[in-house]
Image: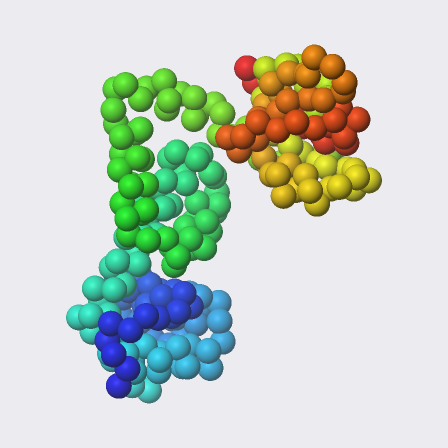
């Protein structure tokens, strides 16, 4: 028997979470229910259930419903709490829509630490409820939906060198013929990134832009290859 408190993979966490959700919904969880829920094959489910059973997290017998042990139910509750906390954060603060909050939560819930998660939850609660955060809530509601890469055919796009000083925009496209394109990518100049043009240098063709909290200098002739969608003021 593997130690009950042994770490489990993100894949096994997904199985444990799925079992808890299916039991909550149907009152029981059969192997086929789990396979359908996770869109995986029956042999994959069998292997995962055997691993969870070896860790004392579930009771598993062929042709019988899967049940959670007390330690399994406790760990599943932690995983589900992580998922719901992250999902609310992405939906309420980052204004992601559709399936994006759920998908983002699925990817991050397995690696985020409890301290970080708790602080994200506290941040979300403060922004969502404090009266002195009303302005911030309004800012998030109008700004966040604008931060996403757009089609390069969008007629609203302008090259970064033509973006008015002080104006913010979201990078939509970086032309492939930009020299040193990997260097710019390493600096965060990639589609979907929020950028602000701070101004021009007094001499030469250098521009100052703000990206991911840092100010960068780049040549205007390079900025011509970076296309952005200006954000509403």
**Image point (37%, 24%), residue name:** 137
Count of marks, rendered view: 0
Q: Position of residue 152 (x, y in %)?
A: 73, 34
Q: Position of residue 92 (x, y in %)?
A: 37, 35
Which image quarter is the N terminus in? bottom left
Find the residue positioned furthest to the left.
70
**Image point (25%, 19%), residue name:** 131
Which image quarter is the C terminus in? top right
**Relative to 233, residue 148 above or below:** below
**Relative to 87, residue 223 above or below:** above
Tell whether 230 sits left or right of 118. right
What kind of colouring is applied to the model shown?
rainbow
Quarter where residue 72 is shown: bottom left
Q: Position of residue 132 (x, y in %)?
A: 28, 18
Tell whether 28 sits left or right of 141. left
Quarter where residue 181 is shown: top right
Residue 94 in view (yes/no):
yes
Q: Position of residue 168 (x, y in %)?
A: 58, 21
Find the residue positioned furthest to the front.
203
Quarter where residue 227 is shown: top right
**In front here: 37 or 230?**
230
Residue 154 in view (yes/no):
no
**Image point (75%, 41%), residue name:** 180
**Image point (31%, 35%), residue name:** 124
**Relative to 35, residue 207 above or below:** above
């Amino acid at each position: 028997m593997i130690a009950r408190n042994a770490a489990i993979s993100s894949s096994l966490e997904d199985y444990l979470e799925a079992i808890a959700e299916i039991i909550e919904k149907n009152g029981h969880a059969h192997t086929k229910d789990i396979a359908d829920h996770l869109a995986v094959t029956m042999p994959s489910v069998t292997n995962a259930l055997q691993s969870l059973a070896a860790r004392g997290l579930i009771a598993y017998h062929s042709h019988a419903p899967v049940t959670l042990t007390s330690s399994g139910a406790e760990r599943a509750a932690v995983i589900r709490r992580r998922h719901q906390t992250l999902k609310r954060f992405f939906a309420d603060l980052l204004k992601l829509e559709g399936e994006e909050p759920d998908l983002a939560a699925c990817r991050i819930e397995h690696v985020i630490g409890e301290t970080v998660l708790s602080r994200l939850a506290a941040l979300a609660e403060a922004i969502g409820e404090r009266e002195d955060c009303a302005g911030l809530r309004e800012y998030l509601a109008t700004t966040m939906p604008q931060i996403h890469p757009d089609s390069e055919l969008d007629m609203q796009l302008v090259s970064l060198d033509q973006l008015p000083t002080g104006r913010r925009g979201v990078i939509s496209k970086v032309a492939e013929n930009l020299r040193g394109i990997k260097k710019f990518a390493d600096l965060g100049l990639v589609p979907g990134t929020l950028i602000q043009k701070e101004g021009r240098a007094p001499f030469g063709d250098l521009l100052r832009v703000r990206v991911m909290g840092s100010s960068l200098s780049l040549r205007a002739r390079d900025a011509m290859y970076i296309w952005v969608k200006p954000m509403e003021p």
